Amino acid sequence: MEERILDDRGDYGRVGKWPAINPEFLPYDGRFGSGPTKVRRDAIDDLVAHSRDIMGTSHRRLGVTSMVGRLRAALKSLFELPKDWEIVLGNGGATTFWDAASYQLIGKRSQHLSFGEFSAKFAEVVRAAPHLDDPWVIESEPGTHPVAEPGEVDAYAFTHNETSTGVTAELTRPVGGQWGALVLVDATSAAGAIGWLPKHVDVYYFSPQKAFAADGGLWIAAVSPAAQERIGELAASGRHTPASLDLSLALTSAKRDQTYNTPALATLLMTLNTTEWLLDSGGMAHVVDRCGVMSGHIYSWAQERPWAQPFVADPAKRSPVVCTIDFDGVSADDLAAALRANGILDVEGYRKLGRNQLRIGTFPAIDLADLMGLTASIDFLVPRLIAEAEAAD
Ligand SMILES: *Cc1c(COP(=O)(O)O)cnc(C)c1O
């Protein structure tokens, strides 16, 4: 990077059309996306370390199956799952898992709490499935979340952390309603960062490119005995299920530490690396603290600024991993563009939400020192962008 000299106006020059940020403020690692998220250097190094013995080898042989086995064991231990739960995995990510769930987890009718882009998408998948009744969808305003209403449904679809709005919902099994109804939780941006109790959940599924700091391409699901039973029943029911979405096949393969077809191996290795790192650094209790401190820094910083405030009004619903911050008097798009020009990436708000907002990831792999650099960088930019906008008027 070219040397930036402080001129007599307190400026450090320009990067493209934007003010260059004082280099003392710049974070060491500028990746604050909400998914995909920052990948740890250690995970990449681990891939390189396995470049000859694991990468490029058969997923039916001990080298790879032992990695799948290690990942299954590590996730069971991280989530403190009861013995009879299974970790199942397959190709395709959470989006593919929605399709699979529509075949072999929902019997007839499901209830969906819809409070953002991702929770709405699963409800759409179910609405389009010809073999299912129309879903019962309960919506709420972006920035809030609805509450389940026990009733005549055989599955509840919850989202632990709505990545599009930065809202977290506590997971509680609905009491009453149809006996044996399953609780299916899209935990894509929550798994490995936000606590939960297995007694409230039947299927906790996610893609590993968010809190697990890996790459896309896999879905991973923690599956309760009741959900395993449902999968078996629906597989035997005569409902036609495409093999790539057949959870009974995925479950059988998982029990042999395999996947039904060739897995995204680099993603798997990086997920394993992060999971073992999370366990070694103190497990969920530690990671919950860590994300609480990092998101706490962002929210309290925003509250102390006249031109910023947390989007989610209820502090209890504010995500500890995806901080959505509204701006007033300065364009969040300009701010994101200026940050990007300075090497600080992916803090743009969720497009479809249409707010003057930044969305900042505070996932376990991110460092507090870098978040402090980010807020110092925003503090540096905002008065300058306001002054420049006024001068241009
Ligand atoms: C990112 C995300 C998804 C989609 O994950 P893919 O791996 O792209 O399929 C689903 N749900 C939530 C909550 C997400 O954050």
Image: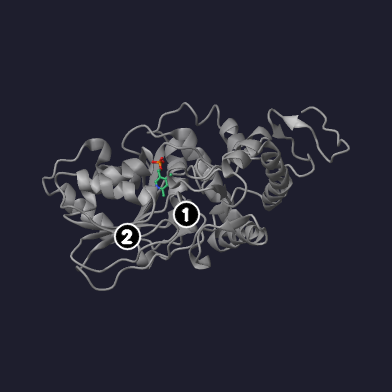
In this view, the mark in front (2 or 1) = 1
Where's residue 139, x and y in %?
A: 32, 58
The disc at residue 190 is 1
Q: How is the image coloured?
A: one colour
Figure quadrant, ligand 1: top left
Which residue is farthest left? 238
Dot 2 falls on a residue whose secondary structure is: loop
Which residue sits at x=71%, y=49%?
379
* Mark 2, residue position: 202
Q: What is the number of the mark on residue 117?
A: none
Residue 386 rendering spot, x and y as whole percentages: 68, 45
| Left or right: residue 14 compared with residue 258 | right
Q: Amino acid at mark 1?
A: Ala
Q: x and y percent of residue 35 in the render?
A: 50, 43
Q: Is residue 127 above or below residue 195?
A: above
Numbered label tally: 2
Residue 64, can we see it? yes
Identity of the residue drawn at 48% across and 52% down: 74
Q: Residues within 10 Å of mark 2 (few under 14, many from 20)?
A: many
Could you tell whether 257 is left or right of 289 in the image? left
Mark 1 sits near ligand 1, with its Cβ under 8 Å away: yes
Q: Quarter of the image for the C terminus: give it.
A: top right
Q: Nearer the viewer, residue 241 or 354?
A: 354
Q: Quadrant of residue 42?
A: top right
Q: Amino acid at mark 2?
A: Asp
